[in-house]
Image (spheres, rainbow, N blue to C red):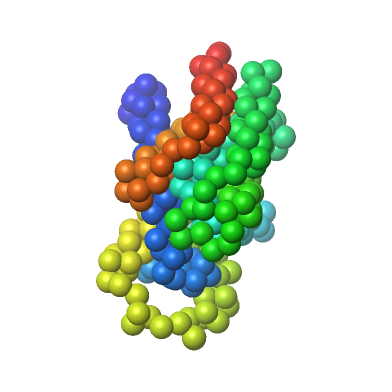
């Protein structure tokens, strides 16, 4: 494969991975309304673990796992799977998919800053402006008095604020996932990383999942929810992780971060088109500020 085709292939994988992420983030709202968060996350990792059993086998040309690589795999799962799932699922249960999309728009700037801090990748002044735009969008949401999100578990003001803060916690986890993933792709293949990271996620979530499963009425869950759960599990644990690892293997972590623009866009579209949400004036302004930050991030990526 020529370098140009390899780059286009990487771009396609990253764009599809982030579109899937935004889609399943928005569609997780009906899931958290039907299933406890920890049970939902445990079932997600369990379904994906079964689907990825063939990926666990060590390739003959793969080096043995060193203690450092084992630690990175654990951190990749703990931050990018375990904590990300908890923050994201609790967050979207308290806020709207549209508001979550605004918060998720800060991911490119967060990944760029983390790449600068931990991978020593160069960052331009406009990236700091992009980070400020992301913060401005978050502050605008925090001070807004939005109506309660459909299915929200607490009062409108508390729901939106706490939900958005939890989603931003997931953003930080996503940034760590991208940075650590860049380290791992230099040693392991995308399939192997995906399966091992998911297995760690399943192990970490098992005690909580069993606890909630013991007292849960599975018969009371509608059939459509189970099909949605299967899609969520395959998209979140297999599709997005494998596609992301495949794409970022050929690109700098900060460069690949621009494709996270697909997360807020797809999350907001699903919220409006599939979940019946509406865009308030405050959300539109916050979204515009966040997208300005992404535009600055894109200009940074395009610079030599």
Residue for point 36% across, 64% down: 229
Query: Which image quarter is the C terminus in?
Result: top right
Q: Quadrant of the N terminus?
A: top left
96 vs 260: above or below: below
Instruction: Name which residue lies at 49% across and 53% down.
Output: 149
Query: From this viewpoint, is residue 53 visible?
Result: no
> What residue lies at 57% left-to-right and 75% top-to-bottom?
208
Q: How many discs appear?
A: 0
Q: Nearer the viewer, residue 113 or 245?
A: 113
Relative to 279, say whether 90 is above or below: below
Q: Is residue 23 left or right of residue 136?
A: left
Name the foreground residue: 209 vs 293.
293
Residue 165 location (% of width, % of height): 64, 49
**Vertically, is 196 above or below 240?**
below
Q: Residue furthest bottom?
A: 214
Q: Is residue 282 above or below residue 298?
A: below
Left or right placement of residue 289 versus residue 241 in this view: right
| Residue 118: quadrant of the picture | top right
- Residue 176: x %, y % from top left: 62, 45
């Amino acid at each position: 494969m020529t370098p140009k085709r390899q780059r286009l292939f990487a771009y396609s994988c990253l764009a599809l991975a982030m579109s899937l992420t935004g889609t399943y983030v928005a569609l997780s709202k009906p899931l958290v309304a039907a299933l406890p968060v920890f049970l939902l996350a445990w079932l997600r990792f369990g379904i994906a673990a079964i689907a990825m059993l063939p990926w666990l086998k060590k390739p003959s040309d793969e080096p043995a796992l060193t203690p450092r690589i084992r630690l990175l795999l654990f951190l990749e799962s703990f931050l990018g799977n375990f904590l990300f799932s908890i923050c994201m699922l609790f967050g979207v249960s308290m806020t709207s998919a549209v508001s979550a999309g605004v918060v998720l728009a800060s991911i490119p700037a967060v990944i760029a800053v983390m790449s600068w801090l931990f991978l020593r990748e160069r960052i331009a002044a406009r990236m700091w402006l992009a980070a400020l735009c992301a913060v401005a969008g978050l502050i605008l949401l925090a001070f807004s008095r939005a109506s309660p999100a459909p299915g929200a578990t607490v009062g409108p003001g508390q729901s939106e604020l706490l939900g958005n803060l939890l989603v931003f916690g997931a953003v930080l986890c996503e940034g760590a996932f991208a940075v650590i993933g860049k380290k791992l792709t230099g040693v392991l293949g995308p399939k192997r990383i995906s399966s091992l990271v998911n297995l760690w996620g399943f192990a970490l979530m098992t005690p909580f999942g069993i606890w909630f499963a013991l007292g849960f009425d599975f018969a009371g869950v509608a059939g459509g929810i189970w099909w949605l759960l299967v899609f969520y599990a395959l998209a979140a644990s297999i599709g997005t992780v494998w596609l992301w690892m495949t794409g970022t293997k050929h690109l700098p972590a900060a460069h690949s971060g621009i494709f996270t623009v697909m997360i807020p866009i797809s999350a907001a579209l699903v919220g409006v088109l599939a979940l019946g949400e509406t865009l308030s004036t405050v959300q539109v302004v916050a979204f515009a500020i966040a997208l300005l930050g992404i535009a600055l991030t894109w200009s940074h990526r395009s610079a030599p």
